[in-house]
Each structure stands twice: as C-alpha cells, then as structure tokens.
C-alpha cells in the first residue's frame, strides 16, 4: 500500500498501485507524488480564488455575498459559525420593525465588502478563527 501525503493539507491518501497523479481525498488537491519531498509552505495554502474554500472550509466570497444580500438577517454569521452574532442581527431586524434594520443592513454591507476585499489569510483570522462574537 502506498501512502501519499498531500502538500497542501497534509492528509494522507492511500493507494495499492503507484500513481502518476494523486488527488487528495480531503481537500481535492492534485499533486505529483514524485515531488512529494518538497512540501508546500503554509503561506502557499492561501491565494485561492474568492469563492474557493479556504483552509477552514469557509469561502470568503460566499460569506461576503451573504452579508451583502441577506446581512440584516445575520445569515453570513450563521455561515461562519458565529451563531450569537447571527441571532443578534436577526432579532434586532425583526424586533425593531426595520427601524434599526437599516443600520444593521449598512453594517452588513460594509462587512460584506470587507470580506470580499480581504486576503484569504486575513479573512480566516478575522472572521473564522477569532474568538470575537461579532467580528465587523
């Protein structure tokens, strides 16, 4: 059994026959097993497209569009796993009958633009891995 380690995520892929190209079962990255001895530095994991999933599995493009289109309902925070912030945005919008909903919508619009323009690393650190209940 051959063990091929993915240079992007570090997970192992097993095969009974030697392969020319290996596709990682975890992240989908295709790599050459001959070049396996040269691991990809961690900073090379970033720099993907806006709608590609980052190392956390969250896409900054999806989060940004959710913030812009459905931000006053807090949908983008639910997507990012910040449920407390999502509930706060949802309750403020529903209970204020839209009066404070415009303020929440403007905050969400700004947050969505910031998500779309941030680098993948900044997005992951600020919106996914931070302990902030409501990262704006």
Image (tube, rainbow, N blue to C red):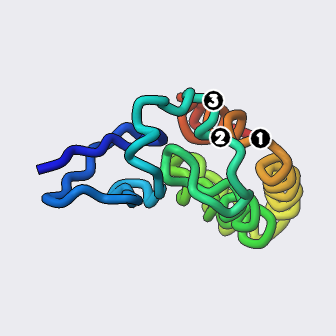
Closer to the N terminus: mark 1 or mark 3?
A: 3
Whether pointer 1 and pointer 2 mark residues with C-beta atoms closer than 8 Å, the reply is yes
Mark-to-mark CA distance, 3 and 2: 6 Å
Mark-to-mark CA distance, 1 and 2: 8 Å
Q: Nearer the viewer, residue 69 or 47?
A: 47
**Is 54 drawn above or below residue 79 in the view shown?**
above
Q: According to the image, label 2 marks what residue?
A: 46
Give the class, few, some or many, for how many residues have Cα within 10 Å of label 3's Cα (few <14, many ≥20): few
| Local secondary structure at mark 2 | loop
Whether pointer 3 and pointer 2 mark residues with C-beta atoms closer than 8 Å, the reply is yes
| Local secondary structure at mark 3 | helix
Corner quadrant of residue 118: top right
**Which numbered marker is on residue 43?**
3
Corner quadrant of residue 37: top left
**Is 35 drawn above or below residue 132 in the view shown?**
below
Q: According to the image, label 1 marks what residue?
A: 119
Whether pointer 1 and pointer 3 mark residues with C-beta atoms closer than 8 Å, the reply is no
Q: Nearer the viewer, residue 126 or 45?
A: 45
Q: Residue at x 49, y 53 (%)?
A: 57
């Amino acid at each position: 059994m051959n063990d091929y380690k993915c240079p992007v995520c570090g997970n192992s892929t097993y095969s009974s026959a030697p392969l020319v190209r290996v596709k990682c079962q975890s992240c989908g990255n295709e790599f050459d097993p001959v070049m396996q001895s040269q691991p990809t530095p961690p900073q090379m994991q970033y720099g993907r497209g806006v709608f590609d999933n980052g190392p956390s599995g969250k896409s900054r493009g999806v989060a940004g569009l959710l913030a812009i289109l459905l931000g006053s309902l807090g949908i983008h925070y639910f997507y990012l796993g910040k449920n407390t912030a999502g509930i706060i945005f949802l309750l403020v919008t529903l209970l204020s009958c839209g009066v404070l909903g415009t303020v929440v919508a403007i905050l969400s619009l700004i947050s969505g633009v910031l998500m779309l323009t941030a680098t993948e690393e900044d997005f992951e650190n600020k919106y996914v891995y931070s302990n902030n209940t409501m990262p704006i």
